[in-house]
Image (tube, coloured by chain):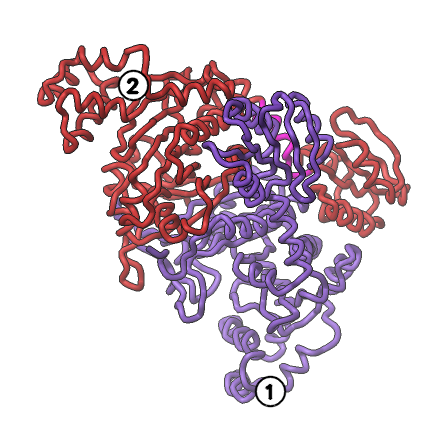
Chain colours: A red, B purple
């Protein structure tokens, strides 16, 4: 009676926490003028064979043959669907298109790595603008997203790099196009490898490790200047660290690449993205030849990060408390007035209050216990005094008698 | 470059419409104290073989063998997952549990019926209470849900029946337990069948059609009286029509059964549900032996219904307009002030406004065109007058000059 390994049951308290995340995702994206789209969970397997985010994904695909003999696959990422949709209808939309998606993705990852096989991902993509201004919008969105949880400059930073600087480096050192991915993969992994291993891998390229390190640690990255000036104007410069050590393993990036990472607890990557000016064309056989910049972030890493940051944790708890399942609990002290209570519940719900009451006769003390457990801020006691009711603020037991027919305006005025 | 047959691409305008639906689903459920849960999209196929909502479902299952040699299936419905989760943890929750789910489900339906193979379903279940008060809560929720879209008593009604009345009838006419499903299936379908066909199917039961019809059309259904009184107290009695002709084909219902149906355009069923006091126990091998009542509704039928009802359509359009991607558009009339504009955008977004601006130099006229296309209510012109800006209400071109540093409070006061 358990979910499959790598899959999650979201009980109401888990769902509320996820919903807090997703709410921030949507809210932040919308403040930047992004609109939400979604595609099918299941696609033709061929869509993922054309080209994909990383070599690993094909081996982790949930694929099978459907009852109509089609080779189909659960989506491992949303970008191929985005490319398909953009190719089909991009002429209908003014550019740039600011699109985001909150979607479930599936990858058959090895379980010993503790990875999920079904996870929720937030993707933001700005399509049809090749300028640094577009890069800045997307990076600012990511920074604001993390700030919306209460994370500050002591909690995270954005490492910022540019593939074009690496292309210049590769040209200078004779690394041909056909070996670019192999070379960048070495750079991507060198932080986690012993120096000897890196040197060994660099040997075929005839590039000394010292040369590589000097390039990475150099103070200025001229190509990033306009982007940094834009982020400075936004007051976000402090969150950003130019760092050529970030290349992101994915073969398809063409310009700026970035990675948000946590500053405590092991410098984990939280989110990553960059500019991919050729991917949409490649995925759509040329019919969506549009530049794009975007990022993705998963729910699991953010849930972990929230646990570790006290300020963000407090903010989350306050939000969850304000969002409690019940706001007002009707205590039925006299069963003769049950239908009066039900009618009152219906009126309160009709204007948007979240209202609970006992479905059968129960002792008043037990009802107050249930009222508190439900998260309600107020209990309304319906009894022999009807049509007058007693309103009790549960935080301090402050009590007031109110005529039932003015309860609505009383509650609105009290701003409970 | 299309989705698989029966699957949908949701472009932003489609997503906004679905989001309007889902927003009402969540809002209404929460007013009734329901909390959201979710389970995995993929489950062990065995979960669906135990028992399911209808015989059809097993034949429509998307099932396959995963890379770990497990027989798995995309969920065709959420109830088996609910049963699994309730069985695992129901001791942790006070009863009744009011749980709802908004989830994607998958069924390989024949395409000629125009059915979707991936659809979104809203399920509300009240678990752990066997009284009519619980039935009334769930039926009131369904009625309020439909009212929240602007549907009134001229648009829909709830047909209400009770399986226990049919059990009494079957006992009286010697229909044994083992043939109950077969018999109820005949009753369920007789509305759509010619009388001769029904008579033919009834023959083995030795029940004349006239006897059946008389039972269905009788004026009083005593078992429904408490439920109707409760709905009367809520002011919802007008929406409900007692009608024993509704049995719902599903074998598992044990008490009240109901169906919301549209009153124009062919009396289509919109949503259905009922009491199922043994299903959770059956699905969980006895570990969740709890009574329950609930209903389900899909997104496609509601989207259809919205199109047909002018009042609801108007309400939807107003909601979508208020929810436009952009509220405020910054027109950059002088590129020297681009960074001032970007900084202003950041401030406005920081307090929650949805703000757009051009990413590169553009003619002012074109920018105003983009402002209008974006759905913004106001354009803010940043030009040589900086640090004063011009605020233009796009609906009537009313214009005011405002110092940039008091724009925020100006916008808040204007309630735009």
Q: Which-is-in-front pick, marks 1 and 2?
A: 2
For the C terminus of chain B, give its image quadrant. Answer: top right
Give percent across and percent down for residue A158: 40, 21
Give percent across and percent down for residue A110: 28, 36
Label ID, residue A244: 2
- The quarter of the displayed image where residue A400 is located: top right
Give percent across and percent down for residue A269: 37, 24
Q: Residue at x 52, y 53 (%)?
A: B280
The number of numbered badges drawn on the structure is: 2
Residue B96 visible in the current orientation: no
Would residue B232 appear left or right of B331 to someone viewing this image? right
The residue singled out by tag 1 in the image is B208
Q: Residue at x 83, y 39 (%)?
A: A409
Q: CA distance from mark 1 to mark 2?
A: 85 Å
Please report, as a chain letter, where disc 1 is located.
B
Looking at the rendering, the stretch of residues picked out in magenta corresponds to: A315-326
């Amino acid at each position: 009676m358990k979910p499959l390994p790598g899959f999650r049951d979201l009980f109401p308290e888990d769902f509320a926490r996820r919903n807090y995340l997703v709410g921030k995702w949507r809210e932040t994206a919308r403040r930047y003028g992004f609109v939400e789209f979604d595609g099918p969970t299941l696609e033709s397997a061929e869509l993922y064979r054309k080209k994909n985010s990383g070599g690993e994904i094909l081996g982790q695909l949930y694929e099978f043959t459907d009852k109509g003999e089609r080779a189909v696959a659960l989506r491992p990422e949303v970008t191929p669907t985005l490319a398909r949709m953009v190719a089909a209808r991009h002429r209908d939309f003014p550019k740039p298109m600011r699109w985001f998606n909150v979607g479930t993705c599936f990858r058959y990852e090895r379980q010993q790595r503790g990875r999920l096989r079904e996870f929720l991902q937030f993707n933001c993509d700005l399509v049809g603008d090749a300028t640094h201004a577009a890069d800045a919008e997307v990076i600012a969105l990511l920074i604001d997203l993390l700030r919306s949880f209460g994370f500050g400059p002591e909690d995270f930073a954005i490492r910022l790099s540019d593939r074009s600087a690496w292309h210049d480096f590769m040209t200078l050192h004779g690394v041909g196009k056909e070996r670019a991915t192999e070379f960048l993969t070495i750079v991507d992994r060198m932080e986690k490898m012993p120096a000897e291993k890196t040197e060994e891998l660099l040997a075929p390229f005839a590039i000394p490790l010292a040369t590589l390190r000097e390039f990475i640690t150099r103070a200025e990255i001229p190509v990033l200047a306009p982007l940094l000036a834009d982020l400075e104007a936004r007051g976000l410069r402090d969150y950003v660290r130019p760092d050529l050590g970030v290349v992101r393993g994915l073969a398809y990036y063409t310009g700026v690449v970035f990675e948000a990472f946590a500053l405590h607890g092991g410098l984990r990557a939280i989110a990553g993205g960059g500019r991919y000016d050729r991917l949409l064309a490649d995925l759509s056989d040329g019919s969506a030849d549009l530049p794009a910049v975007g990022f993705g972030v998963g729910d699991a890493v953010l849930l972990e990060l929230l646990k570790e940051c006290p300020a963000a944790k407090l903010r989350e708890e306050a939000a969850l408390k304000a969002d409690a399942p019940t706001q007002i609990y009707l205590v039925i002290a006299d069963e003769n007035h049950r239908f009066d209570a039900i009618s009152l519940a219906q009126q309160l719900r009709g204007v948007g209050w979240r209202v609970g009451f006992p479905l059968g006769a129960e002792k008043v003390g037990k009802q107050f216990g249930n009222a508190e457990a439900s998260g309600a801020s107020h209990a309304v006691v319906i009894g022999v005094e009807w049509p007058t009711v007693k309103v009790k603020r549960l935080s301090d037991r402050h009590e007031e008698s109110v005529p039932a027919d003015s309860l609505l305006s009383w509650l609105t005025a009290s701003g409970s």
